[in-house]
Amino acid sequence: MNPVMERIKVRDPGEKEFHQAVEEVLYSVQPVLDRNPQYRQHAVLERITEPERVIMFRVSWMDDQGQVHVNRAFRIQMNSAIGPYKGGLRFHPSVNLSILKFLAFEQVFKNALTTLSMGGGKGGSDFDPKGKSDNEVMRFCQSFMIELFRHIGPDTDVPAGDIGVGAREIGYLFGMYKKLSNEFTGVLTGKSLGWGGSLIRPEATGYGSVYFAAEMLATQNQTLEGKTCLVSGSGNVAQYTVEKIIELGGKVVTLSDSSGYIYDEEGIDSEKLAHVKRLKNIKRGRMSEYIDKYSEAVYTEADTSLDYNPLWNHKADCAFPSATENEINATDAANLMKNGVHLVCEGANMPSTPEAINIFLDKKILYAPGKASNAGGVAVSGLEMAQNSMRLNWPADEVDRRLKMIMKNIHQTCLDASAEYGVSGNYMAGANIAGFTKVVNAMLDQGLL
Ligand code: NDP
């Protein structure tokens, strides 16, 4: 084992998601270290794997019955070598230090790939917004920001949404930040359009992921036209992934949430997608309700006793995991291969386990790691920050044009870096090498910090 990895496992035992994310990067960048001895001398691995700052705090809030609850919250300020910390906030009961450190670590490389000036961070809480009233969510967000506001700022740390944090939560968080700081600044991204948000930000991660997939297919003279696609999740990323696949002529046959998934052999068309958006974003309902309207689809309840996810066991050409981490294991990966999938494009962060990734790499399919393919969201967040600084709003086609260009550049950067280090076509190695090199060179330029 790499001695740096060994040290991390001893010092941070139990942080298995963080270990998984670090191990992948350390493995990929080994040839970069061999070619650049100054990196070892400057202990860049030890430094890049240690957050610059971790803030952990209590959030007390009151429910509608007057009962007080206490949640734990964090902000990981991982690396600021190339810009202010930037990364989402996640509200989900599974949130812990390990998950947020893995997400913050991934964010550092992802943000570097966008070519925009953004460092990496991530935060959140084990608060579960599901089943809470708007007032309860507001009280939680306000209490959360009462502590967080002193650690963030438009040139210091700019949070955004992630799982469980959408436009509603960003609104409540921003309102309290503005009140406490007495400033209206672009301190959060993902804001609503009427008060500083950017057009295309809600669409950006999903659209960007599909643009990346289209770029990968183009290297083999293929397009998404007529391709059958499996998509997991039904939140922000999944919805706009489906929207763009439909627009480019593909057919999406699955969507899911943590309770189960639907399989619609006829394909989820624009009308069905509009229904899903209403169901999830307004009614805050469950995917099981899809079959109440579209009885031709089949709903399968999630079964935790299975060692695989049946969503990944359908005939298809492409897969877009867009729900959560480690949602594709080795059995799922083998099922995808057996069913004809030749492209896996990650909309979620780290949705494939290391064993699943090894299968994709062995079979030499088109495999895009989330830190490259889902970078469209943070890229447009960067564009939101730029528009806020200029007090301007770009039209949708302008933002979309820039997003497409950024995704094209990230795709090419991954290919170039993989070729430079003799692993042509390995997007995972390419993304890790390119992101790592940019950040560590900035760290060395700025001296020992
Ligand atoms: P949302 O909260 O909008 O949606 C998440 C979706 O995934 C929901 O359908 C949710 O189901 C499902 N899900 C969450 N946890 C689990 C689980 N443990 N098992 C099964 N399903 C689960 O989040 P986003 O769409 O924003 O995020 C999805 C993924 O994309 C995450 O990995 C996130 O980090 C990543 N990402 C998001 C970006 C963004 O711009 N939003 C940017 C880059 C990456 P349920 O409703 O039942 O919880």
Image (tube, rainbow, N blue to C red):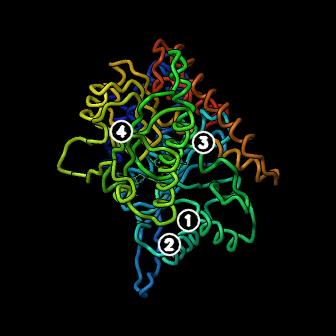
Q: Are marks 3 and 4 in contact (CB under 8 Å)?
A: no
- Mark closer to the chain start, 2 or 4: 4
Figure quadrant of residue 357: top left
Give the percent coordinates (x, y) of residue 116: 68, 38
Above or below — where is 78 with respect to 112? Answer: below
Number of the front mark, 3 or 4? 4
Residue at 33 percent of width and 48 percent of height = 297
The label on residue 330 is none
Q: Nearer the viewer, residue 310 or 169?
A: 310
The label on residue 20 is 4
Find disc 1 in the rendering and name its residue. Answer: 169
Q: Name the residue type under label 4.
A: Gln
Q: CA distance from mark 2 to mark 4?
A: 32 Å
Residue at 39 percent of width and 44 percent of height = 232
Q: Name the residue type under label 2.
A: Val
Instruction: Answer yes or no: disc 4 within 8 Å of ligand 1.
Output: no
Give the percent coordinates (x, y) of residue 440: 58, 31
Q: Name the residue type under label 3.
A: Leu
